[in-house]
Image (cartoon, helix red, strand yellow):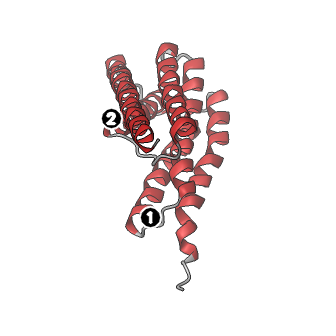
Amino acid sequence: MSKQSPLRFIPNIITLFRFVLILPIGYFLWQTNFFFALLLFVIAGLSDGIDGFFARQFNWTSRFGAIADPLADKALLMTTYLLLSYHNHIPMWLTGLVIIRDITILTGGITYHNLYGAFKLEPSLLGKISTVCQISLATVVLFSISIYSLAPIVIQFFVFLVAVAGILSGADYVINWSKKARLAKAQKSHRT
């Protein structure tokens, strides 16, 4: 029996580091120190790419990582959106849309788990696009209010992208959860 390398924990450690970054990012956003919030937000984004690279490249994947990684992303984005909305840099309706989308997806996953059992956490292509759009908007807004003021049309463009991607990906998840539930229900009735 071969021993697994302790290096396989690197992606999980990086994910935990991203969780830790949420507190100082939230603090700097609350204090309107947007430059340091941007700096830490970029570091958090880079850490997300690095842990994903290690997990895929060396097959250092785990159930913990599959759950914690997207949760770290969601917690970071929700914190950032809520505080940027509080300071009137992102429309509150957009933050509400992002939160409702995430709650819908989470509720669908929990409901499926409770009714039909475990499932594999796989983000859809539209879900990934939505997350990239959300990260892009937060980065652009933080850049605009801390380093160089961008034209309002640039921010509005990213707001539009986040809204459209959020609605489409939310609908896609609802459709996919429904299909999975119908399939699981049919398989369950065939066994009985």
Amino acid carrying mark 2 in the image: Leu
Q: Which residue is drawn at 60% across and 18% down?
A: 86
Q: Report which residue position mark 1 lands on.
A: 54
* Residue 84: x %, y % from top left: 55, 24
Nearer to us in this view, 108 or 149 = 108
* Residue 99: x %, y % from top left: 53, 24
Left or right of 188, for residue 64 = right
SS at circle 1: helix
Q: Can residue 35 be seen in this view?
A: no
Left or right of 130, for residue 21 = right
Q: Mark number for residue 126?
A: 2
Q: Is residue 172 above or below residue 192?
A: above
Instruction: Give the image quarter of residue 152.
Output: top left
- Which residue in the rendered view is the most extreme toward the front? 192
* Residue 51: x %, y % from top left: 48, 58
Instruction: Give the image quarter of residue 134.
Output: top left
Q: In this view, does 168 lie above or below 68?
A: above
- Which residue in the rendered view is the most extreme toward the bottom? 1
For marks 2 and 1, give the CA distance: 23 Å
Q: In this view, does 83 lie above or below 28?
A: above
Amino acid carrying mark 1 in the image: Phe
SS at circle 2: helix
Which quadrant is home to the N terminus? bottom right
Q: Is residue 47 above or below residue 78?
A: below
Q: Is residue 118 visible?
A: yes
Observer-side mark, 2 or 1, equals 2
* Residue 8: x %, y % from top left: 53, 70
